[in-house]
Amino acid sequence: MKIIITGPKGVGKSTIGKRIAEILHIPFFETDEMIESLFEEKHGNKKSCRQIATDHGESFFRKLEKEAIKKAALYDWCIIATGGGAMIFPENRIQLRKESVMILLKATVDFLWQRMQVTGIPPFLQGDNAFDKYSQRVQKIYEATEHICDIIYTVTKENEDTAHEDLLQQIYFVLSQCMHGPNTFGQVLKVTTFGESHGKALGAVVDGLKPGIPLSVEDIQKQLDRRKPGQSSVSTQRKEADSVEIVSGLFEGKTTGTPLCMIVYNKDQDSRAYESIKDIFRPGHADFTFWQKYGIRDYRGGGRSSGRETVGRVAAGAIALKMLKEKGVRIVAYAEEIAGIKGEKVDIDFIEKNPVRSADPDKAHEMERAIKRAQAEHDSVGGIVACVVKGLPAGLGDPVFCKLDARLAMAVMSIGAVKGVEFGSGFAAAHMRGSENNDQMSDGKFLTNNAGGILGGISTGQDVVMRIAVKPTPSIAKLQKTMNIYGNTVDVSIKGRHDPCIVPRIIPVVEAMVALVVYDAWLLQERIGRYDGTV
Ligand SMILES: Cc1cc2nc3c(=O)[nH]c(=O)nc-3n(C[C@H](O)[C@H](O)[C@H](O)COP(=O)(O)O)c2cc1C
């Protein structure tokens, strides 16, 4: 991903681009400078763009410009300011549009013309009717670029000194949007999951990992084993080893910096139970909405909407968890409540020692019994997962559209069966007074943590504390009313192998998603950096 700044000559592309690059701590390039270097490489002598155009004509200059732009299109995570007329040519637009946030800087012709008197009129505009020729060219640039730009900003006398600040906010917004594909997650570390419940395989492609990170199959498998089905009598009896294969991006035990692809082959898919309900919308499932959206659906085990899709998330999250552990960050999730039975004690070492992943040794059995009771009654139960991020430094996250809590909420809400999320005092804050809810500070630290470790979208350095509501498993054997694809009302009882409560199995998925957000925010912060008083 890169930021392209375009617009007519004299609009301020270089000044504004350099200011943004400084704040983001990323390199700044100008295609004009690249043209000059190319000329020197080819002809052995140095000439400015103006000289090249005067001595060799516009078509010679444009040829070099195309070459420079082709080169610039390969750059990543930088700002590139293009020459004024470059975007008039479709090939240049196509090259630069790929993997970029594109900004068009506009200004009135009078404003630009005034500036031009200082910097000089381009050679191919000189002569009679220079102003008219220039007006037409500016118009041409706007017409060619307006429709393909993400951000259009008009520079005026009043805003020319603060334009970079306005643009930064807009860039953050566009980045947060365009870096999310419907199956891709993350800003710097991009995770794409693929696969269906009863398809051939599932997995994830992780892009944006630094080269040289030591990684093994065991690092990933350890987390997948915590998620895999058939672990206990309170999870689905589908038997899957969920053995992961790393098929790319790893060489001699280290990441190569290229996309890391992890695959888990489905081995125990039994689609027979789904044959009889293939035309039926199961209550509580995505069947109806998938049908409405796509007009086609893989009815076997919910296809893409299945909890099995989370295999890819856990595999990717394992890498983030490993990286964060090295930075002293630990993420712990556990079943705080199941079927209304609330844990009180929090014994972190106990979580992986009981099938419901409760942190309270006094309540785990009770929770397990409640799940089995619901199952015996052909029903299911839900619960609340608590998740704590420990050791996070202050300063991670962004203030507006990419608030850390907003990104975490999005991440956990994207997991199937999650219906709510709160941070710190959460919904209880609505019933508190400011004096109760504010986290006062004294002796260099916070006295309470009602904020849940995040203020203004940025981590405070305290534990990030989240609570996540998980609905009862929708697939139940109890008879329920629903509709089929022909619009008829039918009775349905869902057979097959299901988790009678999703809470125990969702826990490693929550940890994985939280780790991916936190690690991504960490990587983003490394790129942006913190102002240290020097320029
Ligand atoms: C780890 C995990 C396991 C799940 N297991 C089941 C299951 O066995 N049976 C079922 O009906 N739903 C299960 N689900 C939930 C469904 O996938 C989910 O509720 C459904 O696709 C509808 O999506 P929504 O609840 O997000 O609206 C599971 C979800 C997760 C994350």
Image (cartoon, rainbow, N blue to C red):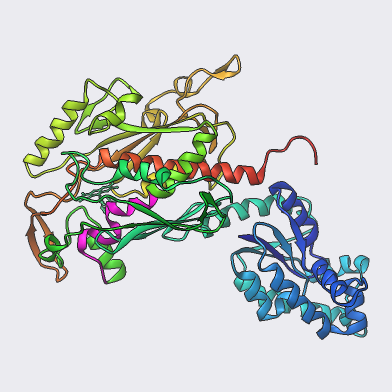
Q: Considering only vertical position in the picture, is 500 above or below 466?
A: below
Q: Position of residue 380 (x, y in %)?
A: 15, 42
Picture coordinates of residue 204, whole percent (x, y): 41, 56
Where is residue 277 shown, x and y percent of the image? 12, 63
Look at the image and give the residue range highlighted in magenta.
296-313
- Tell me if I can see residue 410 in this picture: no
Say which quadrant the C terminus sits in.
Answer: top right
Instruction: Residue 303: say if magenta.
Output: yes
Q: Up-down: is 24 above or below 487?
A: above
Name the quadrant containing residue 199: bottom left
Q: How many marks?
A: 0
Q: Main secondary structure of the magenta part?
A: helix
Residue at 65% from the left image edge and 46% from the top image edge: 527
Q: 428 or 231, which lies in front?
A: 231
User: Is residue 141 in view?
Assistant: yes
Q: Position of residue 128 (x, y in %)?
A: 92, 85
Question: Which residue corresponds to the image point at 60% horizontal and 18% vertical from the top-left?
Answer: 444
| Residue at the image point whose x is 59% and y is 65% from the top | 99
Q: Give the image quarter of residue 427.
A: top left
- In the image shown, does 6 or 368 lie closer to the viewer? 368
- Is residue 190 a member of the stretch shown in magenta? no
